[in-house]
Amino acid sequence: MSNALMSNYGERTLAFERGEGAYLYSTDGRRFLDFASGIAVTALGHCHPHLVAALQAQTETLWHTSNLFRIPGQERLAERLAANSFADRVFFCNSGVEAFEGAVKLARKYQDDRGQPGRWRIITCEGAFHGRSLAAIAASGNEKYLKGFSPVAPGFSTVAFNNLNELRAAVTDETAAIMIEPIQGEGGINPAQLDYLERLREVCDEFGLLLIFDEIQCGIGRTGKLFAHEWCSARPDIMLLAKGLGGGFPVGAILATEAVSNSFTPGSHGTTFGGNPLAMAVGNAVLDVLLADGFLDQVVANGKALKDGLAAMAQRHPAVIAEVRGAGLMLGLKLVVPNLDFIARLRGDGMLAVPASDNVVRLLPPLIIGEAEVQEALDKLERCCVGLAEAA
């Protein structure tokens, strides 16, 4: 590794030179089944031909103008996201954490516009991950990310996940909003109970709060619906997107109802690079694929096949796998053995996965996988379990 790079990512020994579909090819000639997807980013796999064509075409015409001018691709992508969601308006940025920061500002501004500037705090949940900015690590409340960055940014109250009584008790006259991931990713693939999400909507309506869903990791088709919260009846006031929306190209978005989005008046928020023509070309191409007839049905079917196979594997190897979690193609293995050992052994057999909190291994394959890739993954995971059981 280069000595010119900062050391915040630790030691990294594997490098890739190209990708195709669900596979990555390393600089030393090895092929890997990619069930990491750049942490749920390359949602349509590597070098998807439709995305490649869209980006190539845009690079030949226009890269950047800034938001001082209209960007037609932005308008088209916003209209399509609004037409396929609860939202009326969209703001584009560059990343998930920028979407988080903008949503926090929007929630505070909304309450201020209604004559309640004292409502500025946001309730979040233990196990959450909303990004790496100072405000985002404060919202997540995880000591692992907070250590060394005191004082902690104010404005967030953290409560137990899936505990409605504790959440209701945390509501005060200073509370502006509730923010939650419908499925916690970094926290260990922990799904919110669907009735819990529905009760959160009721709590927000009762106390005049905004409901914010962070779908940065669980959105964009990963659970088999375009957005994870669509598995229940609850609809948010604000939603955060990023990761899969760009299929590997940096893009983030804040979606909101008209009543809420009206609080972002000219000059109240902005971005230089957000919503640039390149990102919008790719984002529109991603939606072309996701919204095609039958695509999300295939995500559901392949997710079920993978989860069923994992459940059977957990029964065969209880000394390795304690629990299978998640939905669609956002699955997690809660392990008995150390998750990093599991991931290292998988990598040795040519498969990539992602660690998470609570000793979990995340399986986040591209949404374009089929039966062959599901079976290949199950075969590699089975060999990993056998090897670890024998080594114990």
Image (cartoon, grey):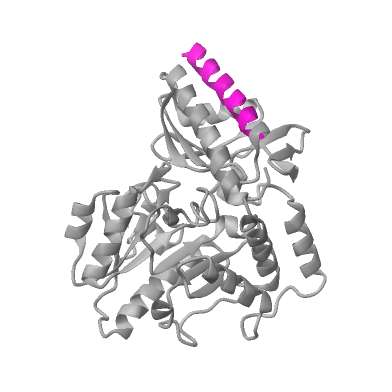
Position above or below: 349 against 196? above
In terms of depth relative to the viewer, which is nearer, 200 or 317?
200
Instruction: Please state, as top left, top right, bottom left or bottom right, where the N terminus lies in the image.
Output: top right
Tell me if 127 is positioned left or right of 371 in this view: left
- Total number of numbered discs in the rendering: 0
Q: Residue 387 in magenta?
A: yes
| Snapshot quadrant of residue 114 | bottom left
In terms of depth relative to the viewer, which is nearer, 135 or 198?
198
In this orientation, does residue 157 appear?
no
Tell me if 42 is positioned left or right of 333 in this view: right
| Snapshot quadrant of residue 325 | top left
Q: What's the residue at 24%, 49% (across, down)?
A: 163
Position above or below: 43 against 347? below
Q: Residue 277 in magenta?
A: no
Instruction: List x then y, in percent, for residue 65.
Output: 69, 80
Position above or below: 73 against 43? below
Q: What's the residue at 53%, 67% (across, down)?
A: 253
Q: What's the residue at 24%, 63% (across, down)?
A: 203
Question: Over which residues does the magenta segment extend?
Answer: 373-392
